[in-house]
Image: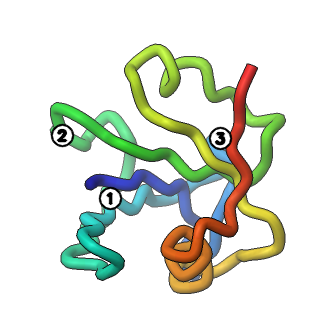
């Protein structure tokens, strides 16, 4: 499965409009297989993204939900490694309408 996360330069989660890079993480059976970094989300050429993880539930998430992605928000996690660990153990909050 593919996970999209907006990041700051030090690989901490950022608001979408402040993101300087976007991580596209391939996650399979509880293990990170690959992580690619892109300057913009438009540069990502993935036909399907399973999950988008955002800074909070107040971020604009409708475009992701319309595309069929599940949207999650972090609780206290900041760094990419912490976020992926929380994802693995289902410790992120689901964002919904």
Taking 3 as reference, is 90 left or right? right
Q: Residue 24 at what x, y percent from top left?
A: 32, 58
Residue that appears at 52% across and 58% down: 20
Q: Is residue 92 above or below residue 47?
A: below
Taking 2 as reference, is 62 left or right? right
Query: Disc 3 or 2, which lies upstream in sequence?
Result: 3
Contact? badges 3 and 1 (CB < 8 Å): no
| Label 3: element kind | helix
Q: How is the image coloured?
A: rainbow
Quickly name the residue at label 3: 17
Crowding at label 3, few (<14), some or many (≥20) Cα neighbours within 10 Å?
Answer: few
Residue that appears at 78% across and 48% down: 56
Q: Measure the C-alpha gap from mark 3 to mark 1.
A: 17 Å
Task: Point out the image quarter for the C terminus.
Answer: top right
Quickly name the residue at label 2: 46
| Label 1: element kind | strand
Q: Which mark is residue 24?
A: 1
Q: Quadrant of residue 31?
A: bottom left
Contact? badges 1 and 2 (CB < 8 Å): yes
In this rendering, which labeled residue sits more in front, label 3 or label 1? 1
Q: Quadrant of residue 17?
A: top right
Taking 48 as reference, is 89 left or right? right
Query: Disc 1 or 2, which lies upstream in sequence?
Result: 1
Q: Measure the C-alpha gap from mark 3 to mark 2.
A: 21 Å
Residue 33 vs residue 5, the one in the foreground: 33
Residue that appears at 52% across and 85% down: 81
């Amino acid at each position: 499965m593919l996970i999209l996360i907006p990041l700051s330069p030090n690989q901490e989660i950022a608001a979408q409009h402040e993101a300087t890079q976007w991580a596209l993480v391939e996650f399979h059976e509880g293990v990170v297989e690959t992580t690619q970094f892109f300057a913009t989300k438009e540069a990502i050429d993935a036909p399907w993204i399973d999950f988008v993880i955002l800074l909070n539930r107040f971020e604009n998430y409708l475009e992701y939900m319309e595309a069929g992605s599940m949207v999650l928000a972090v609780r206290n996690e900041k760094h990419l490694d912490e976020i992926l660990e929380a994802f693995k153990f289902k410790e992120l909050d689901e964002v919904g309408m």
